[in-house]
Image (tube, rainbow, N blue to C red):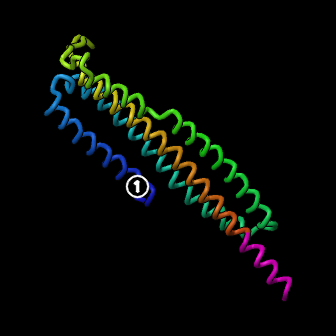
Amino acid sequence: MNFHLKKFVSSVMVKIILMVMVSLLGKTFFPQLYSIVFSSMFWVIYIVLISLIGFFNYLNIKEFANDMEHIYNTKMENMSYAKFEKYATQSEYFAKIHKTKLDIFKALSPIPLIVFLLGFYTGNNFNSNNKINLFHNEFLLSDIFMYFGIGISIFYFYFMYSSFSSYKKNIIRAMHYKSEAIMETAKKEEANDN
């Protein structure tokens, strides 16, 4: 099994173990909600989702290895300096796009909504023992608010992380290309001096 595949398998296994731990905590503290949230359909969907996320991570690692190979091959070509400069410019452009996405995510942070829900939850006019009928089961309103807040936070931080990861990847790629362009310039100057 190659390095990239091992990283994929270990990533998926860690996520499954973490969700099993969360489900055991849910079964202990929220038994009614547990029977609906952690149904067999949930596990199927969850395993498919983490497999997809793991697969995309696998592709990112493989892409990085391909970038290093691309740099090596470009060094052997004519006009490598110009090509490295072109690749660096493209990578910087993509980094700016991902930086803009990060700024938008920061502006749309769900934290004020969560603070509002917590304030509503702890206010005097709110009864957390109210029950709501969902999927033919009764749930405490406080449990629903808690899962809603946790779910929003998890998705928000995942999207923030994925945008930051893409931003970082493009910045690193641009740095590699610029470094190689500098090295190629130095080689040309040394060859001209001789």
Decide: is 82 above or below 145: below
Decide: is 139 above or below 70: above
For the record, the magenta segment spans: 182-194
Residue at image x 75%, y 73%? 184
The image position of residue 129, as x and y in percent, is: 18, 17
Residue labelled with disc 1: 7
User: In the figure, is residue 41 to the left or right of 25?
Assistant: right
The image position of residue 160, as x and y in percent, is: 48, 42
Q: Is residue 121 magenta?
A: no
User: In the figure, is residue 104 to the left or right of 156?
Assistant: right
- Identify residue type, mark 1: Lys
The image position of residue 173, as x and y in percent, is: 62, 58
Q: Which corner quadrant holds the C terminus? A: bottom right
Residue at image x 35%, y 46%? 12
Decide: is 50 above or below 151: below
- Our reading of the magenta stretch's main secondary structure is helix
User: In the figure, is residue 48 to the left or right of 36?
Assistant: right
Q: Quadrant of residue 73?
A: bottom right
Q: Residue furthest left?
A: 28
The image position of residue 147, as x and y in percent, is: 29, 28
Q: Which corner quadrant holds the N terminus? A: bottom left
Question: Could you tell me which secondary element the residue under label 1 belongs to?
Answer: helix
Residue at image x 82%, y 83%? 191
Q: Quadrant of residue 77?
A: bottom right
Q: Is residue 185 magenta?
A: yes
Residue at image x 80%, y 63%? 82
Badge 1 crowding class, 10 Å Cα cut-off, few under 14, some 14 to 19, many 20 or more, is some
- Residue 3 or residue 96, whichever sits in front: 96
